[in-house]
Image: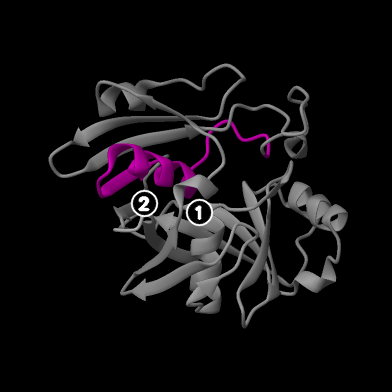
């Protein structure tokens, strides 16, 4: 990867209680420096993060989200990260208006499950089974999960993007050709959104090496997703 442009902030979103881990996110504060989809896609591919967000209007919270392989109308960790970095109360990705709030060390967004891209939610009998998993063969985007403490709503999860070129081909040796060439995603807000909708309850999710995602269903079919954000 070439030297990072100076106008990009790199964050870690959904950090653990110790401030470690979290999913890396690139935030391009001056989105107009990359005026079209082609230039944005090229930068997202070059950076190699699971998502890069371009800020088109910092006052209104208008943002544009890209993986190394495609543009997304919605994604959880980019919106939490952008809301934290820009101190926003509303973020506007292509999917629709997303409300944000800041509560101590946590930043929260409110979103609708139908905005999330498809994920295969695969339940396992225990957290230990999830821990022991190897990366699945190329295929579906799999969110593997198991209860650590069902009564307390504590979940152990891991996210596997499937290593398939999001433009329809097979994985290449280059990181930018697929879902960032990422075998395992460290923290996935959209998948946590879908799992919360499926289970119908608040969750405290540990994903990846130690990232933490909190969720809470709302009365109108929306779901709040919260986590800690740190500068990388």
Asked where in the image residue 168 lies, by quadrant, the reply is: top right
Asked where in the image residue 183 lies, by quadrant, the reply is: top right
Colouring scheme, one of rainbow, by chain, secondary structure, one colour: one colour
Tell whether position 56 is magenta. no
CA separation in Å, label 2 and label 1: 10 Å
Q: Are marks 2 and 1 in contact (CB under 8 Å)?
A: yes
Q: Which residue is mark 1?
A: 76
| Residue 1 visible to an observer of this rendering | no
Q: Where's residue 36, x and y in %?
A: 86, 61
| Badge nearest the viewer, 2 or 1 | 1
Mark 2 is surrounded, within 10 Å at the Cα level, by few (under 14), some (14 to 19) or many (20 or more) other residues, namely: many
Q: Give the structural element (helix, strand or loop) at label 2.
A: strand
Q: Is residue 39 above or below residue 188?
A: below
Left or right: 138 as drawn, with respect to 114: right
Q: Where's residue 182, x and y in %?
A: 61, 35
Q: Which residue is mark 2?
A: 213
| Residue 110 visible to an observer of this rendering | yes
Residue in the image at 37% along x and 39% along y:
195
Q: Which residues are magenta?
A: 180-207
Q: Which numbered marker is on residue 155?
A: none
Q: Residue furthest top?
A: 137
Q: Where's residue 25, x and y in %?
A: 59, 57
Left or right: 221 as drawn, with respect to 32: left
Count the numbered circles shown: 2
Left or right: 150 as drawn, with respect to 113: left
Q: Where's residue 139, x and y in %?
A: 61, 20
Left or right: 91 as drawn, with respect to 1: left
Q: Give the structural element (helix, strand or loop) at label 1.
A: helix
Q: Is residue 1 above or below residue 134?
A: below
Residue in the image at 75% along x and 74% along y:
30
Q: Is residue 217 above or below residue 31?
A: above
Q: Quadrant of the C terminus?
A: bottom right
């Amino acid at each position: 990867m070439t030297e990072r442009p100076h106008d990009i902030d790199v964050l870690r979103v959904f950090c653990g209680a110790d401030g470690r881990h979290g999913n890396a996110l690139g935030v391009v504060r001056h989105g107009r420096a990359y005026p079209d989809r082609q230039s944005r896609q090229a930068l997202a591919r070059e950076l190699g993060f699971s998502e890069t967000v371009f800020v088109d209007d910092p006052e209104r919270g208008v943002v544009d989200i890209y993986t190394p392989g495609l543009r997304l109308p919605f994604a959880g960790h980019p919106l939490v990260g952008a809301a934290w970095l820009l101190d926003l109360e509303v973020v506007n990705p292509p999917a629709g208006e997303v409300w944000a709030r800041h509560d101590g060390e946590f930043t929260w967004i409110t979103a609708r499950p139908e905005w999330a891209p498809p994920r295969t939610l695969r339940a396992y009998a225990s957290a230990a089974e999830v821990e022991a998993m190897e990366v699945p063969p190329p295929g579906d985007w799999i969110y593997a999960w198991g209860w650590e403490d069902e009564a307390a709503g504590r979940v152990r999860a891991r996210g596997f993007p499937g290593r398939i070129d999001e433009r329809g081909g097979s994985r290449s040796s280059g990181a930018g050709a697929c879902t960032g060439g990422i075998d395992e995603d460290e923290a996935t807000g959209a998948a946590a959104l879908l799992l919360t909708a499926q289970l119908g309850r608040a969750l405290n999710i540990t994903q990846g090496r130690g990232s933490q995602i909190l969720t809470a269903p709302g009365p109108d079919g929306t779901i709040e997703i919260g986590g800690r954000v740190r500068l990388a």
